[in-house]
Amino acid sequence: MQTKSAASSLPSATPETRWMGVGHSALSGSAEATSEAIHQALSGRTPRLVLVFCSPAYDVPTVAATAQAMAGDEAVVAGCTTAGEICGQLALSQALVAVALGGEGFTVSSRVASLEAGPREAGRQVAQGLLELERPHKVLMLLSDGLIGLRSELIRGAYGVAGAAVPLVGGCAGDDLLLVKTFQFHAGEVISEGVVGIALGSIAPMAIGTGHGWQRISEPVVVTGSDGRWIHRLNDEPALDYFLHAVRAPAEAYKSGEALPYGGLEYMLGLLRPGGEEIRATVGADYATRSLLCSDVPEGTLVAIMQGSAEGTLNGTHEACQLVSQALGEHEPLGVIAFDCVARLVMLGQAGLMEELKIVTDAFPQAALGGFYTYGEFARARGSRGIHNATLALLVLT
């Protein structure tokens, strides 16, 4: 398990001594694009942490090595491949974004673990960096493989170390919707089928906020048959048939997947939680077993069928910003790291994406904004759960 730490002393820091910067590049060369984006993000400053989010079209080992060389040996450097990138009010594709933070008052520690030993154990391992932090405010950021399920177990493992007081946030790596392989990197090394945990401590408050904007279109129903990846039965009915009835699918959809409404965009499941729903994407169906492909929905869970729209998606953006603003009160944000689901990217289209990013930058006008479009989001402020799809998760630093 790889580890890395970057710390500062504990002076009486002011908000001006801490900083976050962002940069982006669409240059075709992997080293050149990485250098350009990080140069913009650093602006001559010495970082504690550098995050790089890049299209898999780049040579990931070159990106990882170049980023570590530019940031220096004392900085924690991590990142992943994406399904799109965010920098300020720009929603990018086939590009690279760098997010850097530093100054007195930040402490960073990181860990890497393979998911081969099981996601719960991996979550426990990467959360160990929190034990090194002595700051009054802490958060654990997770960058995970985007094509391996059982993410709820990953959160449970991390929660076992972090406890109830430390928020968890992050995203699952993408591969530009190829759905073949995703990558993460840490300390100049590239991994796949793993997870990077970045423990961030600060003398100032940090807050997370989530929003999805999806609406219930069915009554609550119990998952009565599930193996954690496939949902077989809802209320003791075949899950596929219950779903098709709820979304008013045409008759031919009961016989052929070619007529199945595209669940991954317009219809999903909502796991009913106190205060709202956790969205899960329905990404496929097995007509032989009448089952739905929908990960991280345990048997016994109470769910509802959800419907999405562009308008609702933007309402979710407002909700995420409002939750952060309420949590931070009078503290002035200096940076926002966004983990935004690729389903929202497809739902909104380019014009809607610009509107979404304007909502975020208007809510936090003095803050730098960077992030990426994910294959799933992590966000947990309370309880041991916190897996999302089709959701915007924000980490805001002050």
Image: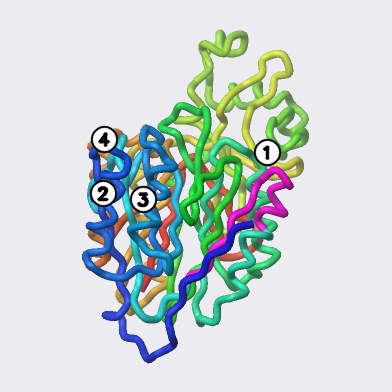
**Which residue shows up at 58% across the image and 9% down it?**
256
Q: Nearer the viewer, mark 3 or mark 2?
A: 3
Q: Is residue 301 magenta?
A: no
Picture coordinates of residue 351, whole percent (x, y): 23, 37
Which mark's residue is nearer the viewer, 1 or 4? 4
- Crowding near pointer 2: few (<14 within 10 Å), some, many (20+)? many
Image position of 6 with respect to 76: above or below: below
Numbered disc 3: secondary structure = helix
* Mark 3 crowd level (few <14, some 14–19, many ≥20, 10 Å Cα): some
Instruction: Find the distance from the CA under tag 3 to the CA under tag 4.
Output: 15 Å
User: How many numbered marks appear?
Assistant: 4
Label 4 sits on a secondary structure element that is: loop
Q: Which residue is mark 4?
A: 28
- Residue 319 visible in the current orientation: no
Q: Which residues are magenta?
A: 108-123
Residue 378 at least partly seen: yes
Which is more toward the observer, 52 or 89?
A: 52
Earlier sequence position, callout 3 versus callout 2: 2
User: Which residue was labeled with disc 2?
Assistant: 24
The C terminus sits in image quarter: bottom left
Residue 221 tag number: 1
Judge left or right: residue 42 versus residue 209. left
Q: CA distance from mark 3 to mark 2?
A: 15 Å
Nearer the observer, 356 or 376:
376
What's under tag 1, amino acid-wise?
A: Val
Q: CA distance from mark 1 to mark 4?
A: 49 Å
Answer left or right for 246 relative to 337: right
